[in-house]
Amino acid sequence: MRMRWRFVLVAWLLAGAGTVHAQAPAPGEAPLRTYGLSLLGTPSLPANFKAFPYVNPDAPKGGEVALSAIGTFDSFNPFIVRGTPAADVLQVWDTLLKPNADEAETEYGLLAGVIELPADRMGVAFELRPEAKFNDGTPVTADDVAWTFNTLRDKGRPFYRQYYADIASVAVEGPRRVVFRFKSSTNRELPLIIGQMPVLPKHWWEGREFDHPLTDPPLGSGAYRVGRFEFGRTLTLERVPNVWSKDLPVMRGLDNFDTRRTEYFRDGTVALEAFKAGQIDFRQENVAKDWATAYDFPAVQKGLVKKELLTHRLPTGMQGFGMNTRRAIFNDVRVRHALALAFDFEWANANLFYGNYTRTSSYFSNSELASSGIPEGAELALLDKYRSQLPADVFTKPFQLPVTDGSGNNREQLRAALALLEAAGWKVRDRKLVDANGNPFSFEILLDQPAFERVALPYVQWLSRLGIEARVRTVDPAQFQRLIDSYDYDMIVVTLPQSESPGNEQSGFWTCDSAKQEGGDNLMGVCRPIIDDLVHQILASPNRAEQVTATRALDRALLAGWYVVPQWHLQSVRVAYWDIFGRPDRPVRTGLAFDSWWIDPAKSAAVATARRAGP
């Protein structure tokens, strides 16, 4: 629900391509100079690859695509807490490296033509391509890279400081060579984290306040630049003619639209109607009811609008009702557990979602990092050190969420929830749940879109059977963002994405330091020594096996803490679009890679003719 402006999350063991073995050089060896990095082995593409395998390198350029966004925007600066940034504005800036959407945790040179890894693993150097230029013709220099890093760390959102905490210094060693030195060699994800840093033009930002919302169209080096816009209503990104990177292997076949126009809507229902009317060309559908019932309109029946499920092969992370433990009412884990027991997923899935979803029972769902069963072997040995800080059930019973008959009469689960609440000091008096002083159990569920009210309101009814007074309040996205940044809420819907290689982002999600930083990502206010320790174990894992062990242990500790009421996930991407596009035939690991699509002139003309003909 919340737009998170962050780098692509990458982690764990860094490795270089161009050698038989993926590891960085051993101590005493010469530095490894490479064109790409992978954390899970040798990159699959050779040094002379022509394009990513999921693209059409000869895709035609041209045309306009109309997209939609919910909410508003008042800034072109997505790197700071202040302001609401425009959708898609990150496409204005190039990064040092570019991920391959078809390959897990692997990146290849974009601005940087060469990556150099020292033998002691205490840093990384990037050598910029001599042809790299900002869109005003100014070369991209090592000084721009260093200035960007220092500025994001000092003035950017809190997670930049967390991501860069293990970087000791940055040094410019030539016009195109920049060197980052690390505080230790244990955090193996740092080269890729730095590689995902957008590089900003130092000369353009001189005289501007970086930590203030930006209202001038920014200068970048990317394939798109800001064109026509009206704050809060519309934004057009224009493809840059003859952009410096157009012939690079990592960019060939991508960014094919001449313009990307995003129209802003206050409500998802209005956005859907705009799509039906042909004002919007492409949308991802996140509402199961709409997917099942709202796409039976004439354009679909005539084949002018296509509706598809695109299967992906990605971890699905965790979505749920997140409880802000900064609020005293949620301090007790028994209370949080009780609130989770009250949610009847089976009823919701049958009656609201048409049976489309799978219940999420892990923070690392749909991946090998998810815990299951009871801890054994290396995982048991790791968790045994924290036995006194964990419930005994962690070691003796598999984690299980309640399963109801779907009738909506989840009495067994509510009785178990009431027993937990009574053990935590709450009692039912006059059909209201109160504490020892007679204060009612009352809280608010904060939402940023009306569509989720149909999920929250039944949950409120189930809670009322326990004597709990829960309320639902829906606010506009800008107000929601301000409340989130200041942690001024009781319960919200949280979405915690995960990658195949968890790393520094876990510090932002879970550690005590992150819980205190305004505008951070620790939305539930989690602060426990065991969690901090397990996050450190993940960051310091010397190999994949130990990373998996530490991540599964963290998963168990988080599940035992009941910080969220787990919801559901979908192993595919729902898309609907007017039939004006061409796209590669080959499926992609991410399910959707919209930047590889293009406007098909023949299809576009046919749809335009049909629209003119009317119903």
Image (tube, rainbow, N blue to C red):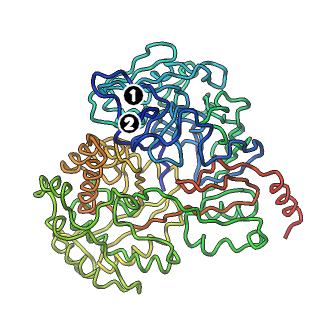
Question: Disc 1 residue type?
Answer: Asp
Q: In which quarter of the image is the C terminus?
A: bottom right
Cα separation, mark 2 vs mark 1, equals 37 Å
Drawn side of residue 556 relative to residue 316, left or right: left
The one nearer the camera, 417 or 165, is 165
Q: Where is residue 246 in the image (x, y as percent from the top left)?
A: 67, 33
The one nearer the camera, 271 or 390, is 390
Drawn side of residue 173 relative to residue 382, left or right: right
Q: Where is residue 282 in the image (x, y as percent from the top left)?
A: 68, 57
User: Residue at 28% across / 69% down in the picture?
Assistant: 441
Question: Disc 2 residue type?
Answer: His
The one nearer the camera, 168 or 121, is 121
The residue singled out by tag 2 in the image is 21
User: Residue at 58% across / 62% down in the picture?
Assistant: 310
The residue singled out by tag 1 in the image is 154
Q: Which residue lies furthest to the left in this view?
A: 388
SS at badge 2:
loop
